[in-house]
Amino acid sequence: MKKLLLTIASLFFLFSFSLTAQTTLQINGVVADSSGEALSHASILILDAQDSTYIGFTQSDNSGNFNIKEKTDKPIILKISYLGYFSFEKRIDPLQTAKLELGTIRLTPINKVLFEVVIKEAKASLKMRGDTIEYDASTFKVPIGSTVEDLLRKLPGIEVANDGSITSQGQSVNKLTVDGKRFFGEDPSMATKNLPAESVSKVQVFNEKSEQEKLTGLSIEKDQKTMNLELKDEFKKGGFGKILAGLGIEQRDDFQTGTSQTEAKWEMKGNYNKFNKKEQFSLIGVQNNTGRNGMNWNDYQDFRGQQSWEWNFAEELFSFSQSFRFYAGGTDESSDEFGGSEGYFGNDAAGIPKNSQAGFNYNYDYNKTKISGSYTYKQNNLFAKAIRKRQFFLPDQNYTTDDQSDLDRKNGSHRAELIFEKELDSLHTILFKLRGNGIFTNQISHGKFLNLSEEGNLTSSLNLDRNADRKNLGWQGVAYFKKKFENKRRNLGVNFIYSENDRETDEDLYSNNNYYGSGGMDSIVNLDQFIDFNTNIRSIKSSALYVEPLGKNFALQFLGNYIQRNDQLVRDVFDKLTDTLVANQDYTYDNDHLFRMGRVGTSLQFGKAGFNVSGGLAVQSIYLNGQFQQGIQNFSKINKDYLDVLQTVSLNYQLATNKRMSLNYSSNVQEPSFKNLSPIIDNTNPFFIRIGNPELDPEVLHQFSGNYNGNNQIKFTNYNINLNYTYYENQHINEQTIDSFLVSTSRAVNFKGGQRMGTFLFYSFPIIKNRFTVRTSLNYSFNLSKSIINSVLNDSKGNYTGFGVNLSWTPNEIYSIYSENRWNYSKTSYSIQSDQNYTIFSQTYNLQGNARLLWDVFCNASLDYRLYNNDQFNVAYNIPILNASVYKLFLKNKGLELRLSAYDLLNKNISIQQQASGTQISDTRTYTLARYFMLSLSYNMKGIKASVKRSNEWMY
């Protein structure tokens, strides 16, 4: 198999290189003004002589020198431009002149009368203004029928990974707008995968300031960028979009039973957009059973039952630094509903999915009034099977588990958002946000768990069946007021956030527990119950920030935060006796939780010439009140007060226009969750019993981080170095007792000394500018965690190293090649049983190619080869996934596409998860999609020109 794959890859590259035996054109020169003074950072463009489309770019250095190399056989135009000067243009034929020495090129200044005319008529492929880079999309040739994602891959300095994530100048793009307006919640992939490249006039990338930065006037170091797509005028006057329908067949083998079955595959997808200067309207719809546009993080949150906006709450409160993030006393009751060791344990991204999604987005922007609204409905159904093997290490023995789990889940969610922003006058702005969601889930799971002693003897077994229906309704309202003063550096911001979340779960639970001794069966315990679980959460959050300037470079910042959260958790458990439900007081509880947090602080900030330093102190008070009622008589109460002083220091330095460094320190305090404090016994899973610890103190940790990043806009190189270290002054660790039947009882306790550290290095550089780019990354992490097992302290040390090399080669519009490769190595060691130390080595190789054939026929193929090795389980997996498609364009405008696709041609797909935590390691395999073929037909409603695609749209 390896020889076959290497042969395919070698032939692919040999074929590619044979097509690119082109002349290397080299041009040298010096750019100067009319008096002979050097002009630094002049734009040097290489354009196609036939249609003036972009080919290459560089800039003159500080001495005005430039050197540009480009592989081409076509005549080109060399264009040199500098603001305030007439451009220089020269036509060059590489076949006649491969190396050209131009000497000093003197540009003529533009007089004031002509200056405005020239500026209005000027058209450059790339412009730089401050930290904003603007690309003229019309000067970049893109493949046939391209999406915005395909266009971005052509832009210098921008990289798009296989998963669709975007980086610019080495920094991730986490927000994308269209004509400056939100597009389905600013998720970049919603626009890049659904909007056609033909619709885009300009692409702008910049560092967007947060509300806090706008108030303080000082930058906070961040490694994320914002991208804006400016549409062409003709796409603002009418509608455009795309529809697709596909039908196929899959043949799948069950790795547990060995049986084979055939199933139909289908896919339907469509989008419609209508934009103008005042309004934007978009519709999107998807339905399939192939996993395309499937589960994302929001979907995962939907069926886990957590609040959709928990992190957004924290981000909308003001703080001294990003590390001053705090939590709202989460109840962490999700394990009482689904997941964990009590239910399905396989990979949720695998299995056999059926997905539906529909939504609309609307924006209005006129006369200092902005209105944005969106609605999305998603239905994610998943059927999955998984098998798992685990090893547990105890001070005096080891044991293993062999587990099986099935899942049938149906999940539907509604999400809506409305935003209103009004600039009342030049000094006052108000903003209101209203969000709501409704999530409805049915989940049926079956699990079989076997506990085996070190000698391989069965000590206990569990059969667990769960059938649960859940309803989750929530809404959130945000009000924000901003006031400016006559002194532009004096600002005030106040916000208020209120949220409600109600969850209701009805579950049928059956468990059959068998315990074995040396003589065979020792005892049997069966549970057959109905559980009614309700959670009501109410939250109030408010924050205020005032900035007072002190002279030209100093500012004093005053901050206040307040949070109050009330949780009520009612769990009624009934035993099923024949046709009667009898209340079980041992498992029933009624808990009320109150969490309050108040924080006031101040910081002094200094900023000058790209150098920002700040130091702050805050006093934080946390109050926890919990009332726990288990059954009729078991009542307990917890009152906890914590008062802490938090410190933060940060330094940010803009070394040059394209280089930045930062150093940060912060101390943080994390209060115990009510679940860890509650004295109530949780034996939802009889093999893993948990009990709270009322004496638990908060976690206290110290965090250090440093970052250095930069880019060379002339050479198109990017680099990033990141270091972080965390030390736990007081940490929550797990204290575990395991009996002779291998039943575990655990609780959280305080301990000192845990630590973790990590480093990440990234470097991207071109072999051939705008044609062949290499991206390399190296990361290392170390984690020292502690646990107590049967009264013995265990130190678990984890070392993880990862190295990646990605190649992007787009020599012309006939074909392109992309390769992503990664090597991961992890080693875990234990103090209680060093002979159980183990290593895991995994490798991933991905190769993708796209080519344009004759008569408007195109093809693409991808090979994904994954290798896993685990010495502890003595297992090795080699998984090659080969995909291919061929398609043809029809009609005069190339708007109709017929495509034949094949997924997993070798029929080898399977999901593998290898994990380690505490004193256990696991190896999990999950049933997933197998080989299938699909014939699809798509139509572009505005008729889009054809081109070679980078992304294989039929495959995810």
Image: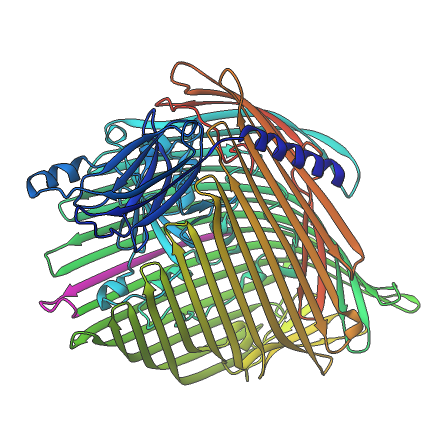
Residue lying farthest to the right in this orientation: 519
Residue 144 appears in view: yes
The answer to whether residue 578 is left or right of residue 270 is right
- Stretch in magenta: 470-490
Residue 793, percent from left and from top? 69, 82
Q: How many labels does the image show?
A: 0
Residue 448 appears in view: no
The answer to whether residue 473 is left or right of residue 253 is left
Look at 36% across and 51% down and name the residue there: 713
Residue 672, percent from left and from top? 50, 76
Q: Could you tell me which quadrant the N terminus lies in?
A: top right
Q: Quadrant of residue 15?
A: top right
Is residue 115 placed above or below 463 in the rendered structure? above
Q: Does the magenta stretch include residue 639?
A: no
Q: Does the magenta stretch include residue 477?
A: yes
Q: Quadrant of residue 528?
A: bottom right
Residue 911, percent from left and from top? 67, 47
Look at 59% across and 39% down and name the residue there: 353
Q: In front: 245, or 613?
A: 613
Magenta residues, dominant SS class: strand
Residue lying farthest to the left in this orientation: 113
